[in-house]
Image: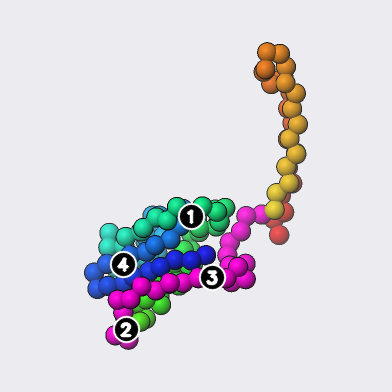
């Protein structure tokens, strides 16, 4: 997981791969003390992460925004902050979907219409 946050007195710019724009915008705004209209998300079409970026806690974005806010409070603000979580950091902190096993079977009839089907799924909720 990674992002770049640039905080100034009246706006905050965020560059990252996005899947949950409204929640992320509100979370960053709350963290830095701005309105959501003052937070600008720059969508990077990076792909991957399989839904991991759609995170209701906006964890890595809030962390980067907190660092930017702390630096601004010390008079060292204005520079972009780049946050990179290693795979190990992400595995310790992230929210993940459960393991799922699914087996699908079906039969096709003539003319190319489904005539029978079944599905068996198993979900690990631990």
- Going 37% across and 81% down the picture, which residue do you hit? 70
The residue wearing badge 1 is 46
Marks 4/3: CA distance?
A: 21 Å
Q: Which mark is residue 76?
A: 2
Marks 1/4: CA distance?
A: 21 Å
Which comes sooner in the sequence, label 1 or label 2? 1
Q: Position of residue 57 (x, y in %)?
A: 48, 63
| Tag in front: 1 or 4 | 1
- The local crowd at label 2, few if under 14, some if 14 to 19, many if 20 or more residues have their Cα within 10 Å, is few
Which comes sooner in the sequence, label 1 or label 4? 4
- The local crowd at label 3, few if under 14, some if 14 to 19, many if 20 or more residues have their Cα within 10 Å, is few
The residue wearing badge 3 is 85
Q: Position of residue 97 (x, y in %)?
A: 62, 55
- Going 42% across and 56% down the picture, which residue do you hit? 44
Q: Which mark is residue 12?
A: 4
Marks 3/2: CA distance?
A: 23 Å
| Horizontal side of residue 79 vs 118, given as left or right | left
Marks 3/1: CA distance?
A: 16 Å
Marks 4/3 in contact by CB < 8 Å: the verdict is no
Marks 1/2 in contact by CB < 8 Å: the verdict is no
């Amino acid at each position: 997981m990674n992002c770049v946050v640039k905080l100034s007195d009246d706006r905050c710019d965020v560059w990252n791969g996005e899947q949950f724009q409204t929640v992320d915008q509100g979370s960053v705004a709350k963290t830095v003390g701005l309105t959501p209209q003052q937070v600008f998300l720059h969508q990077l079409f990076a792909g991957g992460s399989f839904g991991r970026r759609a995170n209701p806690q906006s964890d890595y974005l809030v962390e980067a925004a907190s660092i930017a806010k702390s630096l601004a409070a010390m008079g060292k603000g204005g520079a972009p902050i780049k946050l990179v979580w290693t795979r190990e950091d992400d595995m310790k902190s992230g929210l993940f979907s459960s393991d799922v096993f699914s087996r699908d079977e079906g039969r096709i009839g003539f003319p190319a219409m489904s005539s029978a089907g079944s599905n068996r799924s198993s979900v690990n909720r631990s």
